[in-house]
Image (cartoon, rainbow, N blue to C red):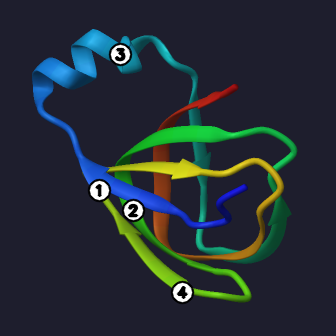
Amino acid sequence: MSEKIEIKKLTDEEVAQLGINNWPIWQKEESTFDWHYDQKEECLFLEGEVVVQTDNESVKICKGDFVSFPQGLSCKWIVKKKVKKHYKFS
């Protein structure tokens, strides 16, 4: 099982094909917290800036990033600018 966070940019067409604009929205103010993924999460950042730290990497995530967090990942979220994102667990 990969514990790597994957980040990519999607075209408007890809966003529409995946139905991302119909996914729920999650928002969070500037803060720091620990998190564990019981399921895989995919999300599209609409606003904000976050640094996610794991034992193996530190990843900066910003507006426009499509991110996949693998199931089983434990990490620390450092929200530097208020986050707004569409998300889906699978």
Q: Residue at x 69, y 40 (%)?
A: 40
Q: Which amino acid does label 2 sit on?
A: Gly
Residue holding disc 3: 18
Residue 6 quadrant: bottom left
Q: Which amino acid does label 1 sit on?
A: Lys
Residue 63: which disc?
A: 1
- Residues at badges 2 and 4 in contact (C-beta under 8 Å)? no
- Residues at badges 3 and 1 in contact (C-beta under 8 Å)? no
Q: Which amino acid does label 3 sit on?
A: Leu
> Mark 3 or mark 1, which has the lower sequence index?
3
Q: Taking 88 as reference, is 11 left or right?
A: left
Q: Taking 66 as reference, is 41 left or right?
A: right
Q: Taking 45 as reference, is 5 left or right?
A: right
Mark in the foreground, 3 or 1: 3
Give the percent coordinates (x, y) of residue 74: 81, 69
Q: Which amino acid does label 4 sit on?
A: Ser
Q: Residue at x 28, y 53 (%)?
A: 8
**Count of marks overlaid on the render:** 4
Q: Is mark 3 on a helix, strand or loop?
A: helix
Give the percent coordinates (x, y) of residue 32: 72, 79
Residue 48: which disc?
A: 2
Residue holding disc 4: 58
- Residues at badges 1 and 2 in contact (C-beta under 8 Å)? yes
